[in-house]
């Protein structure tokens, strides 16, 4: 069974073609600047050099047609013809409270996703564009949507309710939803698999730390709390997002600037590592500047480490313990000194790491010492594989 996985943004998308017999990635690529001058595609057939082409892509449908041509191209392709393609799986950022797992796309599902568009006004319409384009280009195959929020739907009300009048939840569905669910699900389950332990027995804290970041408490395989909330700025300091703020700060910013768009830009696009350091949203640049003595870069770096430490401690307290700590995504998978700094001082809760074993980038590793009570791990995330597996499962259940 061969599955096309699509992760669509408003002007770009990533794709992977996965053969579920052996779970092998046959090809992958990135299409950028859709609808903008200079649109291009980077396509890689596994084991071959990437091919980059500038092609005019006025919309997602034209771009997806081109991807299908690449996938069946005699030189760069991996399919004899499109009849080999069994299904498509799509990343969908927000499923509101309606979707607790992945589903086959039907007209009712599309309608239900449209009903929660206000919860992810930038992401869901873009994700839906991909679904619609694929349905238009390949009407014969089933489509499945996999939600970033679904894994967190197991959170109890005490974790997902905000302390404002309850009517805002009842009437407007204002609550914590959480994101990166596919990634947290994947790494928590992969950790249990690597350790050879049933996930039902484990209390795990998963740290998905990249440009956007979230930390999740996974108790017995279920998300019981997560640091991102109603939107995508709560929790730890991110590349350009603020992380948690006292509501009074938002009120002050609103009073000072007077409009929602300006304040939204401040907390989503001008804050975080970028806003504190004034140098970059990329931790590598911030670390380099801190190393050279830049004080604000040093402060940004220290804040991120401190925020992550606090979440690990609070989620261990929330679950009544911690057995596994997992780092993933750009910073989590590659930030060697960052991981060491986060774990330093957490020995009191059973976290003891081996700095030598920690010297890994982008590879699965256990870097706790043999006598550490908590297993500390790096696990590269693989959201595409979760999407492909869920797509297969949903199609088999048809
Ligand atoms: P992601 O959003 O998952 O692609 O992660 C992107 C972030 O990973 C970048 O902004 C960098 O800050 C971070 N990153 C990548 N490589 C490293 C590294 N070697 N050390 C520290 N941070 C890194």
Image: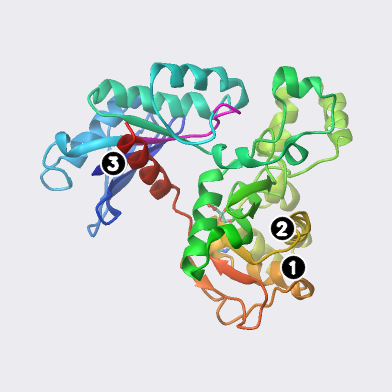
Q: Which residue is mark 2?
A: 308
Q: Nearer the viewer, mark 1 or mark 3?
A: 3
Position of 42 relative to 167 (above/below): below
Instruction: Say what secondary structure mark 1 lies in.
Output: loop
For the residue carrying disc 3, how many other residues have a C-alpha within 10 Å: few (<14), some (14-19), or many (20+)? Answer: many
Q: Which residues are magenta?
A: 89-98
Q: CA distance from mark 1 to mark 2?
A: 23 Å
Q: Residue at x 34, y 30 (%)?
A: 143
Sequence-wise first label, 1 or 3: 3
The x and y percentages for residue 325 are 63, 64
Q: Nearer the viewer, residue 247 or 50?
A: 247
Residues at discs 1 and 3 in contact (Cβ within 8 Å): no
Is residue 294 toward the left or the right of residue 396 in the image? right
Determine whether label 1 and label 2 are within 8 Å by CB.
no
Kindly report the distance in space between the C-alpha atoms of the residues bearing marks 3 and 2: 36 Å
Mark number, residue 293: 1
Could you say which disc has been placed on residue 3 in the image? 3
Decide: few, some or many residues near mark 1? Use Cα within 10 Å; few <14, some 14-19, many ≥20.
few
- Residue 68 among those drawn in magenta: no
């Amino acid at each position: 069974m061969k599955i096309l996985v699509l992760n669509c943004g408003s002007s770009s998308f990533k794709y992977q073609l996965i053969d579920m017999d052996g779970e092998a990635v046959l090809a992958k690529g990135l299409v950028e600047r859709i609808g903008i001058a200079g649109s291009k595609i980077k396509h890689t057939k596994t084991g071959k050099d990437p091919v980059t082409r500038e092609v005019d892509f006025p919309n997602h449908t034209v771009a997806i047609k081109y991807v299908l041509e690449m996938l069946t191209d005699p030189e760069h392709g991996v399919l004899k013809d499109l009849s080999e393609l069994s299904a498509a799986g799509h990343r969908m950022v927000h499923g509101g409270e309606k979707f607790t797992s992945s589903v086959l796309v039907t007209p009712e599902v599309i309608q239900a996703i449209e009903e929660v568009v206000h919860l992810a006004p930038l992401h869901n319409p873009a994700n839906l564009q991909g679904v619609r384009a694929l349905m238009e280009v390949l009407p014969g195959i089933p489509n499945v949507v996999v939600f970033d929020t679904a894994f967190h739907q197991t959170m109890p009300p005490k974790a997902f309710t905000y302390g404002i009048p309850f009517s805002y939840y009842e009437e407007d569905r204002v609550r914590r939803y959480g994101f990166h669910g596919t990634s947290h699900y994947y790494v928590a389950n992969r950790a249990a698999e690597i350790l050879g332990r049933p996930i039902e027995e484990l209390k795990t804290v998963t740290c998905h730390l990249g440009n956007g970041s979230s930390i999740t408490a996974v108790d017995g395989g279920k998300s019981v709390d997560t640091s991102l909330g109603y939107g995508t700025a709560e929790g730890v300091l991110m590349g350009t997002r603020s992380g948690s703020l006292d509501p009074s700060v938002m009120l002050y910013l609103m009073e000072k600037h007077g409009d929602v768009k300006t304040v939204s830009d401040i907390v989503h696009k001008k804050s975080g590592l970028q806003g504190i350091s004034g140098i970059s949203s990329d931790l590598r640049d911030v670390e380099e500047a801190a190393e050279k003595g830049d004080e604000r870069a040093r402060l940004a770096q220290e804040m991120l480490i401190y925020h992550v430490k606090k979440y690990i401690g609070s989620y261990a307290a929330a679950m009544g313990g911690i057995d596994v700590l997992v780092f993933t995504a750009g910073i989590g998978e590659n930030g060697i000194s960052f991981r060491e700094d986060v774990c330093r001082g957490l020995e009191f809760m059973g976290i003891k790491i081996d700095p030598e074993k920690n010297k890994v980038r982008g590879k699965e590793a256990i870097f706790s010492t043999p006598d550490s009570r908590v297993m500390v791990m790096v696990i590269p995330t693989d959201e595409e594989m979760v999407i492909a597996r869920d797509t297969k499962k949903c199609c088999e259940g048809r």
